[in-house]
Amino acid sequence: MRKFLTGLCLLLLAGSVAAAEVERRTANDGQLIMEDIPPIPESLPATLSRYQSIRSARFAGWTKNSKNIFIKTRFGLVTQLHRVNKPAGARFQLTFGDEPVGEVLRQPSSNMLAMTRDEGGDEFDQIYLLNPEDGLIQLLSDGTALNNRMAWDRQGKRLAYRSTRRNGRSNDVWMQDVDSPQSAQIVVESKDGTLWKPVDFSRDGRMLLIQQFISVADSRIYIKDLRSGEMRLLAGDAENPASNIATGFDRKDETVLFVTNQREGAAELAKVNLSGEPVIEFVRSNANWDITQFVLSPDRKRGAFVANEAGISRLYLFDPARMNHRRVQNVPLGLISGLRFSPNSKKLGMTLNSSDSPSDAFVLTLGSRPLKAEKLTRWTFSEVGGLDTRKFSKPVPVQYPSIMEGREEPLQIPAFVYLPPGKGPFPVIIHAHGGPENQFRPRFNSDFQMWIDQLGAAVVAPNIRGSLGYGSLFITLDNGYKRESAIQDIGALLDWIAEQPQLDASRVAVVGASYGGYIALASAVHYSDRLKAAIDRVGISNFVTFLENTQDYRRELRRYEYGDERDPEMRAFLQRISPLNNVDKIKIPLFVQQGANDPIVPQSESDQMVKALRERGQTVWYMNALNEGHGYSRKENRDLYQQATFLFLKKFLIGEG
């Protein structure tokens, strides 16, 4: 059915293309369609090749003996799984498929690896069991539904996961004996369309910790007795919605540890008892910063968490017995993710990324006491295309004021500014993040450095209202009928840019992907008189058609954020603010990029926007990859998109070409 719908979209698009007499070309064996995009100059790939040759390596797990690590990296066209046996050692490739590897989770009793991958970016993940010694792969899931978010029991016999297998739209929790795929059965049925996933098994395998995700501001934790079928709510409720993210059972299976913002401040550590009525105990902390990841060691004697402190990751070790913690010193400034303890609980693996270094795998050797850290060692050294990263532009954090209805004091919007060398004034590229609840953080970004070095443009990345990292109130300031207040923050940013002597307010473009693509389109609607161009990657053009056509398993989750299009009043509001219904106000050139297999923001969102713009004689470049989904994961497609983006910005923002 998915392939049929994609083909139908292409036929409809082909008809509109013929009517509009657009210039249409294909590349990459016909998998990439480019419309009204001029040919790439022969010299441009060589100019940009250093930026496009940058690689990264993400920590993906440990071997059973705690001596070697698994990483995800790309040496061909897509990311594959590799093993590294020592710091700075060779990377031994373990998977060789045509699609990138997703989740990776080692079976506790062996070196066998459960992993996920989809087909052509359709995000219908399947679960496989990989033998890293001989490369043999066995399909564990049903082969058609969405299956991911895996959790092994402690013995490595059963695998629990989230799946839409029952009806294609419900995010249920399933479990199966790994040696008997036909044993798969539902553990929890999702009756409201929200997302349910397994988190952790108790030591004896009788209890399963389960996470329910309703929205970014409302998530709940349950425990299920797999023998009796009883399920109890441990944290969260409808009357007082809060974010509650489960981590796991303690050493004695007496409490569950989790991260919560129930006290309406930053997300903090807490635990809840399993006997009697649930009572929550919060961890003593003076830091008013969100905790973004929290993990426990296999023996449950240690923990580790990452705090997002003004966009920078700080690593802490945690003692579950005493409920205290200590910051790890001498960790390079940057963003930390992918925390995993070794099987012997004596090491902590992670991915570290900074503004001048792509993601690489690091290992922290631990001392004899839970809060003792000994040495941080870098295990991978990814290539940076011969670039001198010491000369990269460093992000500068700023804040600018924006109007907030019902409040006299302006709302301060955080942003990061990247400047080229010199005095300026520089043309400006505004980067709008997706989500909408994501948060821009100063990670390595080859596109930014390419634009700064080769176009002489400054980049400003705001965290407009609705972004994570600034408290539970800030994240809800764009919900429902408040959606366009986020667009006001872009207008306020344009005001701020006009006051900066180093920035050229007469040359500004907005670039965004997914929800950021909507921001780019909406900015073109509201601020065409103050912008030169906009780039929309897989963005929402009409909230009603988006909610009606996004995959069934996502629809309820998005209604909590954007509003329910079935309600007449909300439907009218969503139609009124949608860029597609205000296309007559767009007076600037647009570049629209899409993946034909996108289950999140379907191709129809881009097709209808491109068609409406062309009918009004507006300049619009369109790129559609037939073998991609929500973003481009294949290097050959990503390279051409980056080159075309460079041409677009050079022509319409810089005014050259």
Image (cartoon, rainbow, N blue to C red):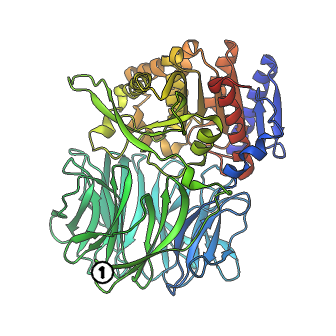
Of 213 and 329, nearer the camera is 329
Quadrant assignment for the N terminus: top right
Residue at mark 1: 301
Q: Is residue 219 left or right of residue 549?
A: left
Compared to residue 295, the image places residue 537 above or below, namely above
Q: Position of residue 101 (x, y in %)?
A: 62, 62
Of 453 and 437, nearer the camera is 453
SS state under label 1: loop
Compared to residue 643, the image places residue 272 above or below, namely below
Q: Is residue 73 left or right of residue 154?
A: right
Compared to residue 478, the image places residue 367 above or below, namely below
Question: Residue at the spot x=30%, y=79% of the render?
Answer: 372
Question: Residue at the spot x=70%, y=77% of the render?
Answer: 135
Of 614 and 460, nearer the camera is 460
Q: Position of residue 374 (x, y in %)?
A: 37, 80
Image quadrant where residue 73 sits: bottom right
Decide if residue 419 is in sight here: yes
Q: Residues within 10 Å of mark 1 (few under 14, many from 20)?
A: some
Decide if residue 150 is in sight here: no
Of 117 and 445, nearer the camera is 445
Question: Residue at the spot x=30%, y=51% of the render?
Answer: 243
Quadrant assignment for the C terminus: top right
Q: Position of residue 171 (x, y in %)?
A: 47, 53
Residue type at mark 1 is Lys
Image quadrant where residue 451 sits: top right
Q: Position of residue 566 (x, y in %)?
A: 43, 28
